[in-house]
Each structure stands twice: as structure tokens, then as C-alpha cells.
Image: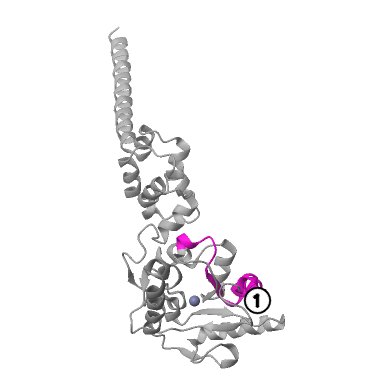
């Protein structure tokens, strides 16, 4: 009898211990789960699928998402090809206030075109070499000149004293010869421009047509790609800026320039990203690899730079 009692008390004790352990375990787990982003995001309305998409984000981005109301657009932005995490807040704000679709909003914010042109400017990062970016937010000092410039022989150009970086001119020669084989002639109409020359070009437009017009078609001094020595304005016999795109030379360049490292720098339909009117004649040397990517993916150099060069 005594033995039996002892045995059952032990069983009861074990049972109690197991139950208490389970309760403690359950409580700790629940408390820990309540601390997870998964729980907190679920609580403000995100679905399992959405939370999975957010999984790769850094903690401070998740904290930001938790600090605002449920927003069904967040995961659409994350899934974008050129999504940059640190821009999420700006994407959402810009998307709310403008009529662009999500893909365009990502491009616009990535290149900082959600800001006023020429605001928040900084010096061009010269260490990027032939991938340096000069646009309405990145400028060259008035003293900047590439130390690797060569003169362009007159047979390839209109006017006197055309100059390009050696690398750009060599690439142009390869392109020129390939076009020649097809019976086409590429003529350099404008190439390197010093800070002072660009200042004159811009101010001429500004004084004759006003600042707004000048800013659409010309860069302010320091902000011109022509100062890099890696930009060429191309024409052919009989063409002008307005008509170049009707010539076979333009069609050939559209299909082949990237093979020689050149890109159409200010394409049609990308004015809101580049800040410039479409220029069928303005080509920028960026090297074959980058030019091919830009050509195949139909993006601008500004977008390429923001995502592949500046972000890393
Ligand atoms: Zn140009």
C-alpha cells in the first residue's frame, strides 16, 4: 500500500513538472515570437507571402515599414529589378504624389530626379574613370580636364580643335570604320568642351531663350558630359540635330554603337530621368561591357550608375 502511494505521487510530480515545463516553454516561445518581425508585420496586416518578400530586408528597413501604415505597394517595389533598399521611403512618397508607375518611380528616385535639377549636387567621382557620371547632380570642377586627351584628325570632324580622351577616340575610330564598311559616314560635330566653352554655350541659350529652355537642351558649366572628353555629338553629311534620326547613320548607331562602347545618352522617353530633351546625336563612351548592358536592358547611364556603381 505504502509503495503504491509513493509510486503514484511520483507520477503526479512528473506530470506536474512536464506541464509546468510545457507552459514555460510555450510562454517563452510566444513572447519571443511577439518580438519577431514576422509577428509584428502580420499584426499590421501583411500576408505570409508579403512577409517572405520582405525577409531579405535589413532590420532598419523593417522598422521603417512597421512605423507606417500597411502599404500594399511595398512588396511591389521590393520586387523591382533595380530596387535599392535605402530608397524605399522616397519611392513610396514619390509614388503617392506623382503619376508614374512603380518601375519609373524606382528609376526616378534612384537617379535622384525626384529632386529639383541642380539641387543637392556633388562632385563627380573621378575614380570611376571611363564610368564617371556627369549629370544635373554630379559636376566637374572648372579646372577638370582629362590628362589623356588626343586631337581628332579633321577627316573625322567638322570644325577645328576637336578633342576626345584617347580611349574614346580609339573606340570611335573602330565604330567609324565599321560604319564606313556599310557605306555610312559618322562625323564628329562636337566633342570635348572646356568649362568655359560650356559656360558660353549654356549662357547663349539662356540669354536668347530663357533658363527653362536652356536647361532642357544644354548643361550648365561643370555639369556637361562634353567636359569629360568621352561624349561625342555625331552627324553625317546633310544632317542636323533635328533631322539626324532620319538618316541611316542614326539607325546604324541605334543597332551597333554599343558594340564599340557607346550609348545614346539622352534617349526618347527618358527625359524625366536624364533631365534632357531627346538627343539623337549625343553618344557617350562607357566601354563595351556597360554599353551592352545598357543597350540590352533599355536603361540610361544614370540608372546604371545608381544601381551598379554608386550603390556598391
Ligand atoms: Zn552633346
Residue 23 on image: x %, y %: 31, 25
Q: Which of 250 and 182 is in front in this view?
A: 250
Camera-nearest residue between 181 and 199: 199
Instruction: Give the position of the N terminus as an image quadrant.
Output: top left
Q: Does the residue labelled 1 lie within 8 Å of ligand 1?
A: no
Name the residue at 45% across, 40% down. Answer: 50
Within the magenta stretch, is there residue 116?
A: no
In which quadrant will I find the C terminus? Answer: bottom left
Would you name the residue on which mark 1 appears? 249
Residue 92 relative to residue 173: left or right: left
- Which stretch appears magenta? 244-273
> 30 left or right of 149?
left
| Residue 225 image offset from top left, x and y in percent | 44, 76
Vertical side of 267 occupied by 80: above or below: above
Q: Position of residue 259 (x, y in %)?
A: 61, 74
Q: Is residue 223 visible?
A: no
Amino acid at each position: 500500500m505504502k509503495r503504491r502511494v509513493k509510486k503514484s505521487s511520483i507520477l503526479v510530480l512528473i506530470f506536474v513538472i512536464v506541464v509546468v515545463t510545457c507552459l514555460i516553454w510555450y510562454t517563452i516561445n510566444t513572447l519571443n515570437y511577439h518580438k519577431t518581425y514576422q509577428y509584428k508585420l502580420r499584426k499590421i496586416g501583411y500576408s505570409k507571402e508579403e512577409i517572405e518578400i520582405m525577409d531579405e530586408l535589413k532590420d532598419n528597413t523593417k522598422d521603417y515599414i512597421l512605423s507606417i501604415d500597411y502599404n500594399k505597394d511595398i512588396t511591389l517595389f521590393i520586387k523591382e529589378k533595380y530596387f535599392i533598399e535605402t530608397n524605399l521611403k522616397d519611392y513610396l512618397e514619390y509614388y503617392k504624389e506623382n503619376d508614374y508607375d512603380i518601375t519609373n518611380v524606382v528609376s526616378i528616385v534612384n537617379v535622384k530626379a525626384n529632386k529639383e535639377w541642380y539641387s543637392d549636387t556633388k562632385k563627380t567621382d573621378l575614380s570611376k574613370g571611363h564610368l564617371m557620371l556627369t549629370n544635373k547632380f554630379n559636376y566637374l570642377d572648372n579646372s577638370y580636364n582629362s590628362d589623356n586627351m588626343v586631337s581628332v584628325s579633321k577627316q573625322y570632324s567638322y570644325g577645328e580643335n576637336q578633342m576626345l580622351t584617347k580611349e574614346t577616340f580609339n573606340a570611335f575610330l573602330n565604330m567609324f570604320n565599321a560604319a564606313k564598311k556599310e557605306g555610312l559616314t559618322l562625323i564628329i560635330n562636337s566633342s570635348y568642351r572646356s568649362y568655359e566653352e560650356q559656360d558660353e554655350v549654356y549662357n547663349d541659350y539662356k540669354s536668347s531663350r530663357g533658363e527653362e529652355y536652356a536647361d532642357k537642351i544644354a548643361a550648365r558649366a561643370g555639369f556637361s558630359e562634353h567636359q569629360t572628353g568621352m561624349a561625342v555629338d555625331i552627324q553625317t553629311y546633310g544632317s542636323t540635330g533635328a533631322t539626324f534620326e532620319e538618316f541611316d547613320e542614326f539607325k546604324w548607331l541605334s543597332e551597333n554603337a554599343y558594340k564599340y562602347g557607346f550609348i545614346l545618352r539622352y534617349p526618347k522617353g527618358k527625359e524625366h530621368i536624364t533631365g534632357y530633351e531627346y538627343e539623337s546625336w549625343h553618344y557617350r563612351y562607357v566601354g563595351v561591357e556597360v554599353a551592352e548592358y545598357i543597350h540590352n536592358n533599355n536603361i540610361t547611364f544614370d540608372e546604371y550608375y545608381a544601381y551598379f556603381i554608386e550603390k556598391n
